[in-house]
Amino acid sequence: MRFRIRAETIRKLKQRISVPVLAIVLVGASLPQPAHSAPADRFPRYLPTQYQTVEPTIVPEQIQGLPRIPAKPRPAQRSLWATVTAYSSTVDQTDASPFITASGTHVHHGTIAWNSMPIGTEVRFPDVFGDRVFTVEDRLNARASAYHLDIWMETREEAIQWGAKVLKVEVL
């Protein structure tokens, strides 16, 4: 079934859409339409409800035997020495919501609190943790020094055992 587009309609379309889009609309309108559509049951493989699952070609047992290429660590933008302490999610060490960071995320391994760096800054402690990357997601109290930061630990005992250390900090 064909239909005609009036000149007035084309003029209104030109005012509202770009020329390439208008060309596609006009070409699509002028193409002949099929007399009938094929029933869906003739082509069941095209129905969206009949997706096939694909099994992986490599199973985890095969991956373990493959040699690993070591990832090249990112170079540090700058290095500094800072006092690194630890904290856990207890109300006396945090605010009323101990499991929510200042950035709005939940605390997790790799979360640090630091006032002098923007939220999202990534850092490393190469002397203790090697190439492991930590992210600034929380803040200390306002009186904290610019060279003081906290690493989140899961338990209070871990935080106490950590104590206070002066470490080299690499800002990525």
Image (cartoon, rainbow, N blue to C red):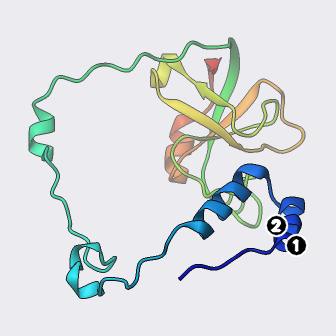
State the residue position of label 1.
Answer: 8
* The one of 147 and 53 positioned closer to us in this rendering: 53
* The one of 58 and 166 positioned closer to us in this rendering: 58
Vertical arrangement, residue 68 with respect to residue 96, above or below: above
Kindly identify the residue that appears in the image at 30 percent across and 83 percent down.
Answer: 38
Q: Position of residue 140 (x, y in %)?
A: 78, 43
Kindly identify the residue that appears in the image at 80 percent across and 75 percent down.
Answer: 6
Whether residue 51 is visible, yes or no, is: yes
Give the left or right position of residue 163, taking residue 43 as reference.
right
Vertical arrangement, residue 67 with respect to residue 161, above or below: above
Vertical arrangement, residue 138 with respect to residue 75, above or below: below
Q: Which element is circle 2 on?
A: helix
Q: CA distance from mark 1 to mark 2?
A: 5 Å
State the residue position of label 2.
Answer: 10
Q: Position of residue 107 (x, y in %)?
A: 59, 54
Q: Which element is circle 1 on?
A: helix
Give the left or right position of residue 164, taking residue 1 as reference.
right
Kindly identify the residue that appears in the image at 75 percent across and 29 percent down.
Answer: 148
User: What's the residue type where badge 2 is placed?
Assistant: Ile
Kindly identify the residue that appears in the image at 71 percent across and 33 percent down.
Answer: 149
Q: Are marks 1 and 2 in contact (CB under 8 Å)?
A: yes
Q: Position of residue 116 (x, y in %)?
A: 82, 30
Vertical arrangement, residue 144 with respect to residue 35, above or below: above
Give the left or right position of residue 1, taking residue 44 as reference.
right
Whether residue 99 is visible, yes or no, is: no
Q: Position of residue 47 (x, y in %)?
A: 30, 78
User: What's the residue type where badge 1 is placed?
Assistant: Glu
Q: Quadrant of the C terminus?
A: top right
